Amino acid sequence: MGRRNSALYTLKYVAEMLGEDEDFLHDCSIEMFSEDGRLSAYDSFPATELSEPIVIFTEDGIDNLKYIIEARRMVGDAPPKPTA
């Protein structure tokens, strides 16, 4: 069995890496669960219902997110890729 990287990647990092809009990626990831590779981290204690989590992804999560992006583009439910 191959060894996977144990790094986690922020939503901002993934958006830059994929050349996608951060808000669009956040929208794509909303229905992902931790088993899908999307995690939430909190930067203040105590976390409350009003605390805004930092969205982070595993490598599998990035792969799953790419699949969601592709599916949304195929049905015309995606903005054009931003131009740098």
Image: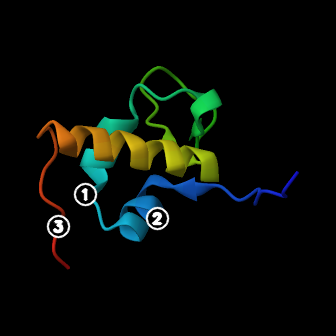
Residue drawn at the location 15% of the way across and 36% of the way down = 75
Residue lying farthest to the top in this orientation: 49
Label 3 close to label 1 by CB (< 8 Å): yes
Label 3 close to label 2 by CB (< 8 Å): no
Residue drawn at the location 48% of the way across and 29% of the way down = 32
What element does badge 3 sit on?
Answer: loop
Q: In terms of image quadrants, where is residue 18?
A: bottom left
Q: CA distance from mark 3 to mark 2?
A: 15 Å
Q: Which residue is mark 2?
A: 13
With respect to residue 48, does 68 lie above or below?
below
Disc 2 residue crowd, few under 14, some 14–19, many 20+, Cα 10 Å: some
Mark carried by residue 56:
none
Disc 1 residue crowd, few under 14, some 14–19, many 20+, Cα 10 Å: some
Task: Tell me which amino acid carries mark 1.
Answer: Asp
What colour scheme has been applied to the protein in the rendered image?
Answer: rainbow
Mark carried by residue 82:
3
Quarter of the figure that contains the C terminus: bottom left
Left or right of 58, for residue 84: left
Left or right of 39, for residue 68: left
Residue lying farthest to the right in this orientation: 1
The image position of residue 79, as x and y in percent, is: 13, 51
Mark carried by residue 21:
1
